[in-house]
Amino acid sequence: MKYKLKDICQISSKTVNPQNNKEKIYNLYSLPAFDNNKHFETVKGNSINSNKIIIKGKLILFNKLNVKFKRIWKVDIKNENSICSTEFIPIKVNEKYVDIDYLYYYLLLNTFNNNLIKDSTGTSNSHQRISKDLFLDKEIIIPSMDKQKKIVFLLKLLDMKIELNNQINNNLYEIGKAIYQEYF
């Protein structure tokens, strides 16, 4: 079945100005944090210069700035002081309709992202954004929950294999580097 994202998701939109609580420690989910191995930053409120979105629970953070870079981050936040950049759309999934892992993989699809890229707007090529409304109006195909779980299972197996191959490649690189340094 096809559903619009707005029919199966909610968007977190409650914001906070961390400058109002300068000594409070926040877990900040930002685009630079995503690019730094998907690890949030722990920072004091006085070092955060703009409003942020309060986040909690199982969410998918979808970047609305430069969608082509696919900064899509599945998180499970338990800390009360977690916030994210307003450049993310924090998506809470209605698990009655869709498995969060299924939606995460779906949002990673090139076909889904290419449609969003076409609809991006901005004053320069380096800063193209999509709107929340445009994002929520997109349709996705959602099979039965059983099929979703099977698809997710297979994709997670592939991800584990890719990760293992990356670790093997990194180890081989380090071994090669050590041999080179030893003999040359």
Image (tube, rainbow, N blue to C red):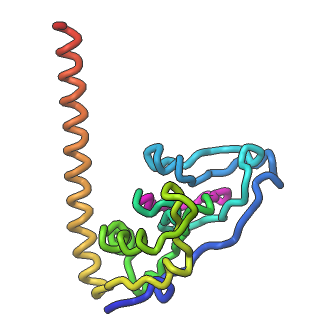
Query: Which quadrant is the C terminus positioned in?
Result: top left
Q: Is residue 113 above or below residue 24?
A: below
The furthest residue to the right: 20
- Residue at position x 21%, y 60% from top? 157
Whole-percent x, y for residue 136 in the image: 50, 81
Count of number-bearing discs:
0
**Location of the N terminus (image quadrant):** bottom left
Q: Quarter-wise, where is residue 156 in the image?
A: bottom left
Q: Main secondary structure of the magenta part?
A: strand
Is 144 located above or below residue 156 in the figure?
below
- Say whether residue 116 is left or right of residue 159: right
- Residue at image position (22%, 75%) is 150
* Image height of 112 relative to 179, above or below: below
Residue numbers of the magenta segment: 70-84
Work out whether residue 126 or residue 1 is closer to the camera in this orientation and state it: 126
The answer to whether residue 131 is left or right of residue 142 is right
- Please say whether residue 72 is one of the residues in the magenta stretch: yes
Q: Which of the two residues, 129 or 50, is positioned nearer the viewer here?
A: 129
Magenta-colored stretch includes residue 155: no
Asked where in the image residue 72 lies, by quadrant, the reply is bottom left
Percent of width and height locating residue 44: 72, 44
Could you tell me residue 29's position as x and y percent? 57, 54
Question: Residue extending furthest bottom?
Answer: 1
- In the rendered structure, the answer to whether residue 126 lies left or right of residue 41 reads left
Q: Residue at x 48, y 51 (%)?
A: 34
Query: Going by the image, does 11 lie left or right of 157?
Result: right
